[in-house]
Image (cartoon, rainbow, N blue to C red):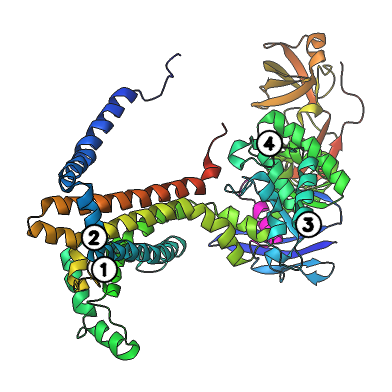
């Protein structure tokens, strides 16, 4: 089932939650809607679930009008951010709910429902907890009950709203892997909403980055990360250093450093270079373009170390990432002076009429 | 066993006050009642209970109160629903109106209802002519007065629970394929049941004990529209203090049994909220 979302708009009072959003969702795809709060991602999810309705635009499922189908007939499995479990029903009754409310003719037999509930609980690794009430479960367990309940109706589309938002870090990572495996097992078209870029990059086949009711970029996680289409995507996905460039002697550059080429042929007076922390070369030789910097802080975060570098010439602090085993090898410690230069940058012109430019250093500028 | 540490200390003092207060306000008068009633002895009590007039009055008091509480549960749920779920002009005024039956002296309520439902009053006349229903000076009148005085309870117990009900549960039910009535019957009603039962019990207790408004509209025909509290007053006026107290104790016993049963039902209805053992 291919879902075609076309030109969807939704306004709440004077706030545009969705502004002309179009998107195709392929069968079996695992799609992430990524964006800050208020970017419209949850509104989009609720429209797909039939709990909200767009002011304009259409959603088609294999060519048929999906918006005309009421929520209860859409065969959409929805997992709420706070699970919305039925507190007065046991785990097993929660999972069975979607089967029990079916019209008499379509309702499976009692024994069949029980067997299906049992199988689903096994699938979500909650066997033996069927007689508990939601209040007696941990957050991760509740999450899986919500998932089992959504899967019980054999949906054609699974929607997850911030599926890991309310869980602590360890459970979150474990559940993430597990959900990815489940998706590979079931092959169910899945759309999930998240504000956590790490989650989106790790889980999804495709990521749609949303901002202010619009989709800024949609693509594979690698593309969105390596080749961001807009300044917003640069800043929202991963950490990034923002370096303003201006024309110095006809070349775009900043405080003595220049990318060395000019795609706009003198057309843009200003531009901004976005440089990821891992694309900052440390210990650049003195005869190469670069900036003199001083290490301010070293944060060791497991396998990676984050450095804060004061660059006086730019009057800003840059962030750089190095493998933590390189810390000792390079003798990196607070107070150390060294030269740094970008290895790779995405450059956006300040004025209109210019395209984004992905710049890569010609040769190895790294001295390490 | 080590004492458990609490954020707010004072269990001993708190419990002491509670027991002393309850003893003074509730238990002491009730024991005085029981002591006074013991004056007529077991034989006297049985004789009193066997009297057809007593039985008729007790049946009307408790039967009428049950009917009134049921009517209030249904109407109260609807009113609470409208007040919580919809926004309309005059909602706050309507909300304030709900409490009026509490504020009014019951005798005033009784006189007003009687004037309205009497055979020559405007509702009473119309009902008599078109439907042949007699409200004032009948058992129906008793129930009407009981409904009036017990009305606010269900609204006020259900309202806060309904207001904090998680709307996402309803959306989840819809998305799982439930029709509206299924969502109401399987999700909303069970969540409201504990509050609804509390309101029902309060309305019931109020209706059983109601005197002021009922005696005006009831007409007080022995064996037909005479309530048990009226019998008690009559005994008092005849200086039969022990008999009055005995009838009081009987009413107390019935009420206690009813409220205890409701409390058990209420506990069952919120079994899901109990923490793991």
Residue A33 at x, y percent in the picture: 73, 49
Give the camera-side residue of B147 and B4: B147
For the residues bearing labels 1 and 2, Cβ distance under 8 angstroms: yes
User: How many numbered badges does the structure rendering display?
Assistant: 4
Give how far apart the Cα atoms at labels 3 and 4 are: 22 Å
Give the left or right position of residue B169, taking residue B18 as reference: right
| Viewer-side label of 2, 4 | 2
Q: Which chain carries label 4?
A: A
Q: Mark 2 lies on which chain?
A: B
What is the residue that sits farthest to the front in this orientation?
B43
Q: Residue B257 carries which label?
A: none
Residue B106 at x, y percent in the picture: 19, 63
| Viewer-side label of 3, 2 | 2
| Viewer-side label of 1, 3 | 1
Tags 1 and 2 on a common chain? yes
Examine the structure image and report whether residue B111 is included in the region drawn in magenta.
Answer: no
- Magenta span of residues: A34-52
For the residues bearing labels 4 and 1, Cβ distance under 8 angstroms: no
Give how far apart the Cα atoms at labels 4 and 1 are: 53 Å
Give how far apart the Cα atoms at labels 1 and 3 are: 53 Å
For the residues bearing labels 3 and 4, Cβ distance under 8 angstroms: no
Residue B174 at x, y percent in the picture: 64, 61
Residue named by callout 1: B145
Does residue A248 appear anywhere in the picture?
no
Residue A50 at x, y percent in the picture: 68, 63
Tags 4 and 1 on a common chain? no
Where the C terminus of chain B falls, by quadrant? Answer: top right
Q: Which mark is residue A140?
A: 4
């Amino acid at each position: 089932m291919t879902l075609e979302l076309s030109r969807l708009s939704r306004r709440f009072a004077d706030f545009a939650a969705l502004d002309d959003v179009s998107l195709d969702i392929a069968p079996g795809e695992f799609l992430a809607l990524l964006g800050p709060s208020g970017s419209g991602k949850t509104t989009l999810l609720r429209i797909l679930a039939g709990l909200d309705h767009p002011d304009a635009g259409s959603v088609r499922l294999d060519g048929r009008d999906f918006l005309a189908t009421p929520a209860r007939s859409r065969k959409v499995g929805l997992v709420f951010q706070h699970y919305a479990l039925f507190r007065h029903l046991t785990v097993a009754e929660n999972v069975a709910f979607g089967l029990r409310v079916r019209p008499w003719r379509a309702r499976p037999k009692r024994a069949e429902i029980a067997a299906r509930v049992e199988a689903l609980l096994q699938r979500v690794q909650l066997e033996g907890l069927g007689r508990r009430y939601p209040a007696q479960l941990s957050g991760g367990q509740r999450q899986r009950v919500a998932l089992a309940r959504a899967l019980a109706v054999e949906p054609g589309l699974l929607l997850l709203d911030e599926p890991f938002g309310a869980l602590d870090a360890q459970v979150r990572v474990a559940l993430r892997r597990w959900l990815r495996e489940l998706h590979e097992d079931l092959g169910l078209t899945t759309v999930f909403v998240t504000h956590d870029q790490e989650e989106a990059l790790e889980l999804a086949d495709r990521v749609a980055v949303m901002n202010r009711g619009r989709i800024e970029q949609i693509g594979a996680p690698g593309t969105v990360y390596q080749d961001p289409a807009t300044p917003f995507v640069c800043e929202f996905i991963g950490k990034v250093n923002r370096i303003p460039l201006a024309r110095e002697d006809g070349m775009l550059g900043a405080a003595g450093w220049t990318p060395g080429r000019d795609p706009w042929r003198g057309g843009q007076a200003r531009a901004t270079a976005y440089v990821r922390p891992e694309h900052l070369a440390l210990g650049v030789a003195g005869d190469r373009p670069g900036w003199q910097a001083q290490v301010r802080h070293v944060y060791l975060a497991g396998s990676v170390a984050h450095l804060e570098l004061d660059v006086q010439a730019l009057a800003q602090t840059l962030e750089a990432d190095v493998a933590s085993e390189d810390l000792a090898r390079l003798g990196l410690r607070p107070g150390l002076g060294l030269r740094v230069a970008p290895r790779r940058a995405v450059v956006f012109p300040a004025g209109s009429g210019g395209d984004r430019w992905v710049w890569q250093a010609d040769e190895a500028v790294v001295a390490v | 066993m080590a004492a458990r540490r609490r954020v707010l200390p004072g269990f001993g003092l708190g419990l002491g006050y509670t027991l002393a207060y309850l003893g003074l306000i509730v238990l002491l008068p009730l024991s005085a009642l029981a002591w006074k009633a013991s004056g007529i002895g077991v034989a006297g009590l049985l004789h009193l209970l066997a009297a057809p007039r007593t039985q008729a009055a007790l049946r009307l008091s408790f039967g009428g109160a049950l009917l009134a509480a049921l009517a209030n549960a249904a109407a109260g749920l609807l009113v609470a629903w409208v007040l919580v779920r919809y926004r309309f002009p005059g909602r706050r005024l309507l909300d304030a109106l709900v409490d009026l039956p509490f504020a009014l002296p019951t005798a005033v309520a009784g006189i007003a209802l009687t004037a309205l439902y009497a055979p020559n009053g405007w509702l009473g006349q119309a009902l008599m002519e078109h439907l042949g229903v007699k409200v004032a000076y009948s058992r129906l009148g008793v129930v009407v007065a009981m409904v009036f005085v017990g009305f606010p309870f269900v609204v006020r117990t259900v309202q806060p629970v309904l207001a904090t009900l998680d709307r996402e549960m309803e959306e989840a039910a819809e998305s799982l394929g439930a029709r509206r009535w299924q969502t109401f019957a399987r999700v909303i009603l069970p969540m409201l049941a504990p509050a609804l039962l509390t309101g029902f019990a309060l309305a019931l207790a109020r209706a059983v004990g109601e005197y002021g408004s009922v005696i005006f509209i009831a007409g007080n025909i022995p064996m037909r529209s005479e309530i048990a509290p009226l019998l008690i007053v009559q005994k008092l006026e005849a200086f039969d203090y022990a008999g009055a107290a005995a009838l009081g104790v009987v009413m107390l016993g019935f009420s206690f049994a009813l409220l205890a049963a409701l409390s058990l039902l209420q506990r069952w209805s919120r079994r899901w909220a109990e923490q793991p053992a």
